[in-house]
């Protein structure tokens, strides 16, 4: 399979990479990687995401025009866009912080309890040079049903080296061996790298939801104006993966 060949080539660049199940001693490193990865989403959703939401651009342009007509001041055309960008950054940061608090009060605060005490879930870490450099979890929705590829995050210094591929493949193996029907995930990332990663391991985008409500968001009027994201839904039919693996053998 082409995707697997690419993953193997990437892994050759990190010959000492080990992917193993989560241990309690890994908790602090996992939480740090998760925190740093989520904080990167602030600029992603505030600035990179803006061009993907024409409805927001139209709203900001309309407000600028109305304010200019009312005030007849040319500086409004310069000042308002700056205010919009500051507003987007402020509310993106606030929502991401709320999401981090929400996550820490749930699974990210009790990794062992959420992922290691059930046959339907598991968490793995990627270790390089004795240091945890990435993590991922699998959460089975129901016996024989779907598995969610969850909490995938890689230290930014170790990206594009096959770490994400190795972690994702653990979830696919989990789904195969436990008899699940599919693997799915959702991402609000606007950068291309995460999408390329999911496609490399065989996942395909099956839909996009605009106006996704991030867990922990307060959904105030200003938050609704300045923070608007979409979520890409990815899925992989495990039966097709099983047939491919059998053919390779």
Image (spheres, rainbow, N blue to C red):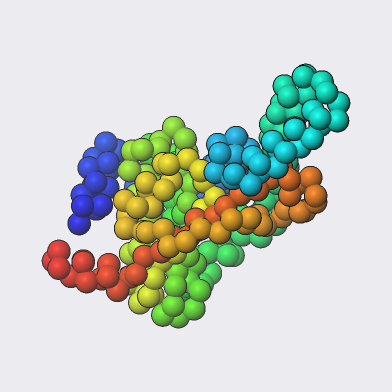
Q: Nearer the viewer, residue 78 or 113?
A: 78
Give coordinates of residue 189: x percent, y percent.
52, 46
| Residue 210 quadrant | bottom right
At 78% across and 24% down in the image, what residue appears?
76
At 48% across and 46% down in the image, what residue appears?
153
Picture quarter with the N terminus: bottom left
Q: Which of 242 and 111 is in front in this view?
A: 242
At 67% across and 51% down in the image, what residue appears?
99
Give coordinates of residue 32: x percent, y percent.
58, 41
For residue 41, say whether it is visible: no
Looking at the image, the residue that sits furthest to the right is 71
For residue 214, say whether it is visible: yes
Q: Nearer the viewer, residue 164 or 83?
A: 83
Picture quarter with the C terminus: bottom left
Q: In this view, does 239 lie to the left or right of 87?
A: left
| Residue 94 quadrant | top right
Q: Is residue 241 left or right of residue 57?
A: left
At 76% across and 37% down in the image, what residue appears?
63
Q: Nearer the viewer, residue 208 or 185?
A: 208
Give coordinates of residue 175: x percent, y percent.
37, 69
């Amino acid at each position: 399979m082409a995707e697997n060949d690419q993953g193997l080539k990437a892994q050759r660049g990190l010959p000492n990479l080990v992917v193993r199940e989560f241990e309690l001693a890994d908790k602090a490193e996992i939480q740090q990687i998760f925190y740093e990865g989520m904080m990167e989403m602030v600029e992603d959703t505030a600035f990179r995401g803006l061009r993907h939401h024409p409805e927001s651009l139209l709203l900001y342009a309309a407000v600028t025009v109305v304010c200019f007509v009312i005030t007849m001041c040319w500086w409004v055309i310069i000042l308002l866009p700056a205010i919009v960008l500051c507003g987007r950054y402020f509310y993106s940061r606030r929502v991401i912080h709320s999401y981090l608090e929400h996550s820490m009060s749930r699974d990210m605060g009790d990794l062992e309890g959420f992922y290691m005490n059930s046959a339907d879930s598991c968490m793995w870490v990627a270790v390089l040079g004795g240091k945890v450099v990435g993590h991922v979890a699998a959460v089975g929705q129901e016996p024989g049903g779907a598995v969610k590829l969850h909490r995938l995050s890689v230290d930014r210094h170790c990206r594009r080296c096959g770490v994400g591929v190795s972690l994702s493949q653990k979830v696919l193996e989990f789904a195969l061996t436990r008899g699940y029907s599919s693997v799915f995930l959702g991402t609000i990332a606007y950068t291309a790298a995460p999408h390329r990663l999911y496609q490399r391991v065989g996942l395909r985008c099956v839909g996009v939801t605009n106006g996704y409500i991030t867990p922990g968001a307060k959904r105030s009027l200003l938050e609704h104006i300045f923070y608007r994201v979409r979520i890409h839904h990815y899925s992989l039919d495990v039966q097709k993966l099983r047939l491919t693996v059998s053919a390779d053998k």
